[in-house]
Image (cartoon, rainbow, N blue to C red):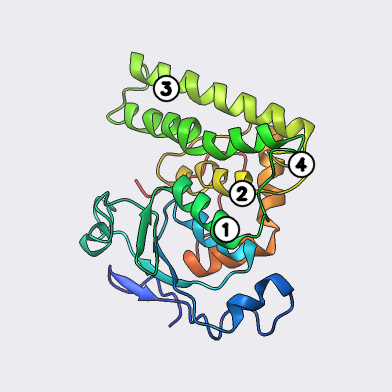
Amino acid sequence: MLNNPSLPAGPHDDINPSTDRLPSCQFPYLCKYLDMSSTLTVHHLRRSQSERVIWLCEELGIPYNLKSYDRVPPDMKAPEEYQKIHWSGTAPVIEDGSVILAESNAIFEYILTKYSDGRLSLPPTHPHYADYVFWLHRANGGTQPALISLMFSRLGGKEESLESKYAQTRVNQNFEAMDAQLAKFQYLAGDEFTAADCISVFSLTTLRLFGAFSLEKYPNIVKWLQRISQREGYKRAMAKGDPGLEPVICAHAPENTIW
């Protein structure tokens, strides 16, 4: 069944792994996956960070089942059915056989370890391994928490509050460091695209629909987002997970937001 934004809140089976994956064994390391139905299911809350997991699967070219859920107005929370999948009640969530796993970084580590055959990650012997590990964990360990703190601190017109100013300082520090890294390299862990890029993009794109902010002071971040937006894996992931949503890769703050 195709994604349909007009469907009521709840799960929608979007992907048939037997027909929507690679048509033949074009890559030897994928042969073992193509002769069986995938047990990996991505539970995707639309307009959320679970887009990262769809994108990771698309970049790796691994089979997976996709179940999408619409946010429930007016507060745009996840539907109750989604919140019951894992006790945390948060997105993203995956199922793989008897495994039910939440948390972006845990899911990335699980998929990369089990399914990637070393792709999209760097070994400890790589000269940019430290960059890879740092940015892989910085996304949800520093960048996104700072942005969310800033968004909530500004609710009710409290832009000048001490909390808001502190959050803005943290955001600026994150963006300045990221922009400096991307001034030296094409991607966050050097000139090779990795899972560190994959996990970092949401905070600088779709998250801006919940609290608009500008990236005009950070030209290297914008160029990086533009490069990312041309990747076929990213295009497929966004089309399947959030059809009709234009990726927010502009430098200026988006005008139309969800909140």
Which is more toward the observer, 74 or 94? 94
Which amino acid, mark 3? Ala
Instruction: Give the residue displayed 46% in from the left and 22% down from the top.
Output: 168
Is 77 placed left or right of 184 in the picture? left
Residues marked 2 and 1 touching at CB (< 8 Å): yes
Is 158 placed left or right of 26 in the picture? left
Which amino acid, mark 2? Ala
Which is more toward the observer, 249 or 62? 62
Residues marked 3 and 4 touching at CB (< 8 Å): no
Q: Quadrant of residue 79?
A: bottom left
Front: mark 2 or 3: 2
Q: Position of residue 20 (x, y in %)?
A: 56, 81
Can you say which quadrant of the picture contains the N terminus? bottom left
Which type of secondary structure does the marked residue at label 4 adopt? loop
From the viewer's perspective, is residue 197 above or below residue 43?
above
Instruction: Tell me the CA gap for discs 4 and 1.
Output: 19 Å
> Which mark is drawn over residue 195?
2
Q: Earlier in the sequence, mark 4 or mark 1?
A: 1
Residue 7 in view (yes/no): yes
